[in-house]
Image (spheres, helix red, strand yellow):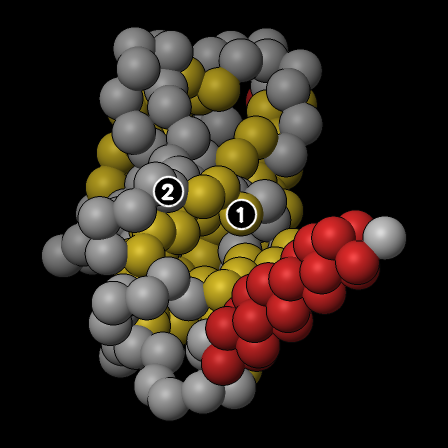
Amino acid sequence: MRRTLLVALLLGLAATGTACTMLDRSRLRFTNGLAAPVRLVFADGPPRIIPPRETVELVVPRGASVARWELVRPLSADGKPMGEEMRGAIVPRGRGTVADSAWVRVGDADYFAPLVTNASADLLRVTVNAGLAGARDCECAVRPGTTRVFLGYYRLYGNSTVRARSPSGHEAIFRDLGPQVKSRDGTVGLRFESKDLRPR
């Protein structure tokens, strides 16, 4: 009986010690405010994938002075990452809980994600910020009949554009998108129809 009580007492003390140790550790409450998953990693530890629009609370590993996140970019049919890289760093300090997030603003740059609906009869090649210094081809072809196709995130300016071009060279373009991007995750729906595509 005494031995049983001693074992129970030791187990209780061990559990209490573990709980105190966990409470003593700092925690990170991380929100993925983007429309795509992000990869979060502490130092050289294993990465964790955080789904879009989800908040997690994690214990900061001992010795981890920084946590890093990066956008998991969508891949084209050729396996090439679409859009621009987005990443950030978080420095948990002291005890307690630190709150941070992946958001559409990184440093001094804003980003947006066009969601392309192809209501035309042609494959469409999409270029974001066409005509601007930061123009980027998605290196993809959006098939006819597809809706709200996510092509990654791109720099957002007041005069940002999204251009769709058919194999015949006809094209349509949305201009001055800056004021039109109002969603918290930076997405904006754009619909291209056959009547919109005109010769260059």
The image shows residue 69, relative to residue 157, as above or below, that is: above
Decide if residue 152 is in sight here: yes
Rendered position, 58 above or below 19: above
Which quadrant would residue 164 be assigned to in this image?
Answer: top left
Horizontally, residue 127 falls left or right of residue 48, namely: left
Which of the pair 111/2 is nearer the observer? Answer: 2
Between 80 and 115, the one lying in front of the other is 80
Callout 2 crowding tier (Cα within 10 Å): few <14, some 14–19, many ≥20: some
Quarter containing the C terminus? top left
Question: As displayed, is residue 186 above or below residue 17?
Answer: above
- Label 1 and label 2: CA atoms lie apart by 10 Å
Count of marks overlaid on the render: 2
Q: Percent x, y for residue 89? A: 28, 68
x and y percentages locating residue 178 in the rendered image: 45, 69
Q: Residue at x 57, y 30 (%)?
A: 149
Amino acid under disc 1: Ile
Q: Quadrant of residue 167?
A: top left
**Circle nearer the viewer, 1 or 2:** 2
Which residue in the protein does label 2 denote?
Answer: 47
Residue 60 found in image quarter: bottom left
- Residue 64 position, x and y percent, is 27, 66
User: Residue 161, labelled with which disc?
Assistant: none
User: Dot 1 surroundings within 10 Å: few (below 14), some, or many (20 or more)?
Assistant: many
Secondary element under disc 2, as helix, strand or loop, is loop
Q: Position of residue 31 (x, y in %)?
A: 57, 65
Residue at 46% x, 76% y is 25
* Residue for point 45% across, 57% down: 112
Residue type, label 2: Pro
- Is 125 or 88 nearer to us in this picture? 88
Taking 166 as reference, is 148 left or right? right
Which mark is on residue 50? 1
